[in-house]
Image (tube, grey):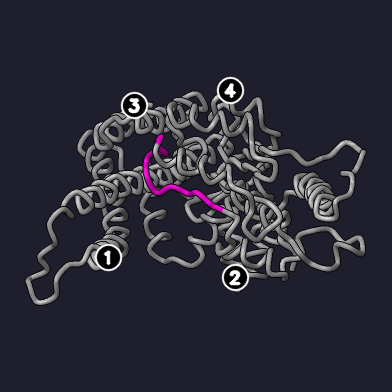
Amino acid sequence: MAVWDDLIGQQPVIAQLTAAARDADALVTAAAEGAEPPRAASKMTHAWLFTGPPGAGRSTAARAFAAALQCVSPDRALGGAPGCGFCDGCHTTLVGTHADVEVVATDQLSIGVKDTRDLVRRSSMSPANGRWQVIVMADADRLTEGAGNVLLKAVEEPAPRTVWLLCAPSIEDVLPTIRSRCRHLNLRTPPVDAVADVLVRRDGIEPELAATVARATQGHIDRARRLATDERARERRAAVLRLPLQLDDIGGCLKAAQMLVDSATEDAKQVAEEVDAKETEELRAALGAAAGTGGRMPRGTAGAMKELADRQKRRSTRTQRDTLDLALTDLAGFYRDVLAVQLGTSTPIANTEVRDAITRIAANGRPENTLRRIEAVLACREALDSNVAPLLAVEAMTMALRAG
């Protein structure tokens, strides 16, 4: 398979990246042979910015491009496009073991100055084995302002064989000084039918379930795959879609808000149970926790243990927020379906499993009320981004949904 096979419904982007990988290959080959670089204008550049809605495949595109840049397939010499998917360069990049490809996908709320400086130092080095030094930043929108300023210098004056691949939801999520120095590629939401097809073909999902989850997530392939393979995720989503029918009084609003927050907290707790204990034990062993002493740690290691605990706490906070955000996205989708029914549009509803509830709420309200409810959901998402206490933000939303 080619490196682009996981990039669904993005043919224009694939064409641009393939052309750039060809030119990048020509540049490296000419340098290795001591020849003059190609005279034609190169489609390759040192910094790229991938944007697009959630589920579009921003980081997938960046990883695939990184693999194409490291491709060493002999077919390239015969006119084949880089990115075979089978050679050592492609394979190690895609599985995350290539020495010259660094992928940064934070599980924290932000990317700080210290981590960014480490990346900038790495970017100044020549490739160890590969053809390019490639740094993929999957969450460039999470850079703090200070970290963005640190990154700017490296993007302005990169090393000759270094490529930065930045990913963010939109161009506005990246500092203007950085985005102005990147070549911008905007990905679209994949078609629902294409997502369903890949779930069946690659993941072995039953066609009916694949079609249901692809439609429910409106083309978000990662969420669709999780719904198709995780029964608990489907149960949580079903609980969210029942919420609009539980807002008959103030008590119901407060109970529904508590349910959403508790569900997100439980999700964060589940992640912590799976990851935190293993991380803690690995660090204790690395720091030399003495066996047979009740796990007593050597002197001078308390700071490292506290740093890990703080990092785990921040990850738990992000997991809770991300889970809440997914629930709010599903809720907004419910009211979008209500609005489509009220306006009599030909757009098929996404949440077919709750069609009766959608029809009932549509019949008992007006389009302007539904728009206000959608705005309330979006306002809650913005409040969570601004660090408003989750329960307070969700309670305000459920009260607004009832009033709407």
Q: Disc 2 and disc 1: Cα gap in Å? A: 37 Å
Magenta highlight range:
102-113
Asked if disc 2 and disc 1 are in contact, CB closer than 8 Å, the reply is: no
Q: Position of residue 240 (x, y in %)?
A: 38, 48
Q: Disc 3 and disc 2: Cα gap in Å? A: 43 Å
Look at label 4 and name its amino acid.
Pro
Q: Which residue ends up furthest to the bottom in the rendered image?
A: 292
Q: Dot 1 corresponds to which residue?
A: 286
Q: Quadrant of residue 164?
A: top right
The question of residue 140 being in magenta is answered with: no
Residue at 35%, 49% in the rendered image: 319
Label 4 environment density (alpha carbons within 10 Å; few <14, some 14–19, many ≥20)? few
The one of 338 and 307 positioned closer to us in this rendering: 307
Q: Disc 2 and disc 4: Cα gap in Å? A: 39 Å
Look at label 3 and name its amino acid.
Ala
Residue at 68%, 51% in the rendered image: 132
Q: With respect to residue 208, does 216 lie above or below? A: above
The tag earlier along the polypeptide, 1 or 4, is 4
* Secondary structure mostly seen in the magenta stretch: loop
Which quadrant holds the C terminus?
top left
Which quadrant holds the N terminus?
bottom right
Q: Dot 4 corresponds to which residue?
A: 176
Residue at 83%, 47% in the rendered image: 23
Q: Dot 2 corresponds to which residue?
A: 203
Closer to the camera: disc 3 or disc 1?
A: 1
The tag earlier along the polypeptide, 2 or 1, is 2
Q: Dot 3 corresponds to which residue?
A: 403
